[in-house]
Structure formats: structure tokens, C-alpha cells
Amino acid sequence: MKTSDKMGSIKIPYNNNFLDLFISLTLFFGLVGCGQNSDEQVAPMMKPPLQQEVTTSRPPKPVPTLAKVTESTRNTYQWYCAQCHGTKGKGDGINAKLLTVPPRNHTKAEYMETRTDEQLFEAIKFGGLSVGRAPCMPAWEHTLSEDTINSLVQYIRELCQCEAL
Amino acid sequence: MTLKALIFLCLGGIFFFTPTPTQAGVLEDNHCGSCHRLNAEDTNTNPAGPDLHYAGQKFQPQWLKQFLKKPAVIRPGGLTTDPSFLQGTPDNMSPHPSFSEEDTSKLVASLMNLKSVESNFEPVGTEPLSKGQRAKIKYQFERTFGCISCHQSLNLAGKVRGGVSGPSLVNSGNRLQAEWVNHWLQKPEVFISKSRMPRYKLDALTRDQLTQFLMTLKNENIR
């Protein structure tokens, strides 16, 4: 259940009243797409949070046994993620310029340290929408195992040379 | 035996034993196999061009005809298996050869005979999508699944937009067979051992409607 909610899909019974409601709702909220020159404007809520919004008084969490970054983690990143995030994780992949919201620069510590490992995990598993980020970041839950996603989180930590604050 | 008779025999031999080009022969004669996989036995997993061993299950013959006469770029970022794909400057971006009307017809006929993967494709609904269904699917295409991040499509103004790491879908309604699209969305591993596209678990209705939506995307709608 959690999964489908996270996908951000809107369930509409196939009934005309609901379709009308759907259309008016979409018109109301506006469609946010990922393509350049899209008809839609990016909703302001899609902006990443400012750094000062992050509380520093978070209680320390139990440290999970960290996933290992292996050759296969790097290959997975190159195969799937680099098309948007770039081969070095700088957010400059071949799709980058064509997206309304640019792919996250995984080497930028100032931002990456404001995100917890759990948030990164969820973003990868359930897609950008699930963590209040842009839908241009797809969900990998049916493509990658949780172990792989955990190791990708650690790889991103390697790229930014940073930890969650 | 005189020299004349010998020459006559040789020429006769050539005449009698040269096999008339069979359908598969046309593809061989034009060396299509040097860049494309044409049968399931071909173990070259990294060919320079798209896999065609199921071409007859994937493409619309009219589109193949047009393409072979006047090739157009479908993968602006190159083939995902190309080693330089991620640099945006793939090696194999040399233009596709073009063919005469006569050759094209023969090539299309042989391509449409290539059907070497499972054939249990589900039928796709033919009832056109209502306006509401279309709006819903377009929303899912852009937001829920983020297809537009990697695939070019058309916006409401009829302008091309979207990412370039996947094949363009701008003309999918003319290019692809609906049942193939549906099967790809369900079981991509039938067609490619490892794609760069994320996998989706779509329910049958969403898959059917998404397929129908893709089939409405056509070049003639570009404005």
C-alpha cells in the first residue's frame, strides 16, 4: 500500500464524474512535466529546501550496517543513473539540459549533507515525487533490489564526500 | 572439349547454380546483418544498430518503407549499448543508408518476416481514449512514470520536448505496432537482455491505455 501511495499515482474510478473532477483538479494544480518547453510551470513546492530549514538537533540514529560500494554498484550507476546524473555524478548527463528540473548534482556536499540516507534511499526506490522532489527522477523499485539501492546511497556519499548532518 | 564449350559450361554453371535471392537473402545482400541482429542465433550482443530479429513483430511496414527510403534519427543519444552513449557523442551515428523504391519493398517484405520472439502479445483496446483518459495518461507519462525525462514526445502545443537517452516516441503511432508496445511495457526482457529503462509494474488497464496514448503520437501532429 505504502508503495503505490509513494508512487504519487492518482487513483480514479472510471466514472465520468470522477473524470471531470480529475480534469478540473489537474487544471487547477497544473501538470508538472519534465520536458523542456513543457506547457507546465514547475510548482514552487518542487524547489529543494533551503539549508537553514534543516534542524541540527536531530537525535542520533542507530547506525545501520553500511552497504558496501562494489564494482557492481559503480556499474549500476553508470548504466542507469549516468544518463541523467552524468558519468561523474555532477548532474550533467545527456538528458540533463532537457529536464525542467535538473538532475541532482551528487558531488555537491552542501546540498547532499542536508539529506538523510533514508531520504536518498526513498528517492531512488520510489522516485522524486515520493520525497517532495521532481517527478523527472524515476522510481527504481521494480528495477533494483534494496541492497543495490543501499549501496547506491553509499556510492552517492562517496561522490559528495559527505555524510548526512 | 573446345575452349568455347568450356566457357559455355562455366557460364551455364553460374546461370544454373547462382541461387535466386531469397527473402532473407535481400537482407544479407545489403549487409544489414553487419549492424543489426537478424536472428535469435546471432550472439553479437553489442551490434551497432537496433536488434531487428523481431522486426516483423515491432514495426509498421509503411513506416519501415519510409525510413529505408529516407532515414531519420530515432535515438538522438545513440544506441544505449554504444560505449560513448553517455558522452553524448556515440560512435555509431553515421547516417543509415537509403534505398531505392524497388529495394525498399523487398527489404520491408523480409523484415516483416522476422518474428523470432514469443508471439503471445495481448491485444490492445481499439476504443479511442476519452479526453479524460488521455489527460490522465498524459499526466502519468510525464509525472507518475517520468517517461518524458528520457523520451521525446509532443507537448500540448505540438512541440517536441523530452530527454534523449531513450528512443523518440514522437512518431510511435506510425512506427510501432501497438501490441509490441504493450508487450515491451510488460516484459522488456523478451526483446533486450538489459535495458537502461526502469521497469514498471503496470496494471493491465494502465498498460493498455498508456499504449493507446503512445499510438496517438505521430509526426503529423508536430506544429
Image: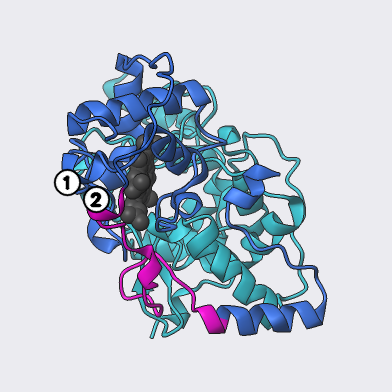
State the cyan chain. B
The total number of labels drawn is: 2
Span of residues in magenta:
A27-54
Q: Which mark is residue A94?
A: 2
Residue at x-position 75% and y-position 52%: B204
Q: Is residue B1 placed above or below B222 in the rendered structure?
A: above
**Mark 2: secondary structure:** loop
Q: Which mark is residue B97?
A: none
Q: Position of residue A77 (x, y in %)?
A: 32, 31
Is residue A46 located in the magenta-colored stretch of the structure?
A: yes
Residue at x-position 44% and y-position 57%: A135
Residue at x-position 72% and y-position 84%: A20
Q: Position of residue B9 (x, y in %)?
A: 40, 25
- CA gap between label 1 and label 2 equals 10 Å
Display colour for chain A = blue
Q: Which mark is residue B89?
A: 1
**Mark 1: secondary structure:** loop
- Residue toward you, B130 or B54: B130
Task: Output the chain of dot 2.
Answer: A
